[in-house]
Image: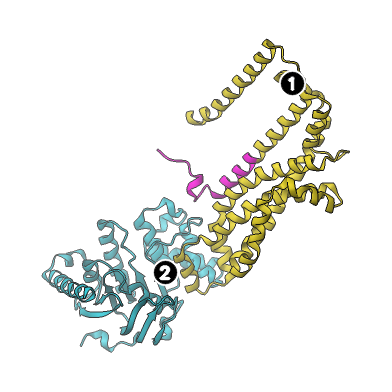
Amino acid sequence: MNGRNWTSIAAPVVVGLVFLLLWHVLVVINQVPSYIVPGPLLVLETLVHDWDSLYRSLLITLQVTGSALLLAVFLGSLLSILFVQSRLLESALLPYAVILQVTPLVAIAPLIIIWVSDPYDALVICATVASIFPVIANTTVGLRSVDTGLIDLFRLYGASRTQILLRLRIPSAAPYFFAGLRVATALALIGAVVAEFVAGTGGTRSGLAYQILQAGLQLKIPRLFAALFLITATGIVLFLVVSWLSRLALRRWHESELIQER
Amino acid sequence: MTPSDKSAAAVDIRGACKTYPNGTRALEPIDLTVREGEFVTVVGPSGCGKSTLLRLIAGLSPPSGGGIVMSAAFTPPRLAYVFQSPTLMPWVSVQAKVRLPLDLAGIARAEADKTTHHVLERVGLLDFARSFPRELSGGMQMRASIARALVTGPRLLLMDEPFGALDEINRHRLDREFSELSARENLTVLFVTHSIYEAVFLSSRVLVMSSRPGRIHGEIGIDIPRPRTDSFRRTPEFAAHSAQLSEMLGSAMQEAAR
């Protein structure tokens, strides 16, 4: 590991530690009660103490987010491929994808929760609705952004539509797809949390958002902070996983993932 | 009477023309016969329909009128096209890029790899088979494009300003190598360029086109044995042909301006 790599990891860690220290010091000096702002040590203590129930909720939130993301990627890519095959289909369906995107999720979520009997499924659907648009929009642009010379070349050698799709359009679309996937990942988590807030369902299959809701109502603010911390951590981990996948797929050839040689 | 007059016609264009749907007349009716083994170069100002002419011959764009008769021995896969840009597929190695036409034709991998190996050897890219396009210089990328065109064993090559983006040193080098390769393999070539010197260096016949709408303004024959070497560039014949071509191009531009 070289020097530049070290600083790129160490710098944000130092900023984080300074922030935690300031937080702790300010809470102690001002004697802020823990039901308004708990100190970082108390949050950590709560996280350890309530780990069993929080961990169960974390798994549920992860499951909802993951399932939604997979669905969004599958359905979104499929729709993009259909759009690229037929302009008619695109002009017929794209406006509805846009309508779905511009309507706030909090406004649709109650309906979905009423219509879908299983609350878990309802959450997955909400998170999918929230995250599918960037996949569709980016992948469609990517599938169309093909070098015209290459299209001519494929036609010259009598390539079929399927060959053009698999060997030319899909590889060309990969960088666009991964850019969309990063946005979709963040949106899927937001969708999962927002939907659970709206649903307000408890029981054994409650996610982190429900824990926040409950902790807020019961003024268990340290627990609220602990759940919030887990949501943020989930978001960061998901983002890193997607970035890693993107690097894995593109590192040999695409400018966005190349390390500049100096 | 040049020797090529006796050879069979590879491409016979009879009054083919092209008008785009928006009404742009890209190409007036053209009559042109390219004979087997000929190296025909087309020069002319931008917008004179040079590229359109190649696209018509390749079947990438249908003519609006007239016809093009292709000898069966000169149609795909015996026809290959080298595009203006190196038409990279940045996600595959040079090897896979060159093998593409064989893959599309469904040829077994082992056989395709063997053919690809030979072609890469011929264009001097064997050491770069596993490189990705972005790791290659412009000249190397163009070599890879030529290798891809050669991989199906074509008899007719259509080339659309292939060396236009290269610096002069690389361009001269590729011109020389390509002159050698096309003569050795008796390829029939239709080559589009902006450069008078490149046209004189490579061709057995040069067509001058004028623009708006595109048409053939005139042609000169260059009756000097091929392949040619760099010393040809310093001969009085080279200078004389270049001057003649330059003059013809000048009058084509004047005609277009009127």
Neighbor class of circle 2 (other Cα within 10 Å; few <14, some 14-19, many 20+) is many
Label the cyan chain with its letter.
B
| Amino acid marked by disc 1 | Ile
**The C terminus of chain A - image quarter:** top left
Residue B50: image tag = none
| Amino acid marked by disc 2 | Ala
The image shows residue B114, relative to residue B256, as above or below, that is above
Q: Disc 1 or disc 2, which is closer to the eye?
A: 1
Q: CA distance from mark 1 to mark 2?
A: 72 Å
| Spot occupied by residue B153 in the image (x, y as percentages of width and height) | 42, 74
Q: Main secondary structure of the magenta part?
A: helix
What residue sits right under mark 2 in the picture?
A: B149
- Indicate yes or no whether the magenta region holds residue A259: yes
Q: Is residue A66 visible?
A: no
Label the yellow chain with its letter.
A
Range of the magenta residues?
A239-262
What residue sits right under mark 1 in the picture?
A: A36
SS for dot 2: helix
Name which quarter of the figure residue B234 lies in.
bottom left
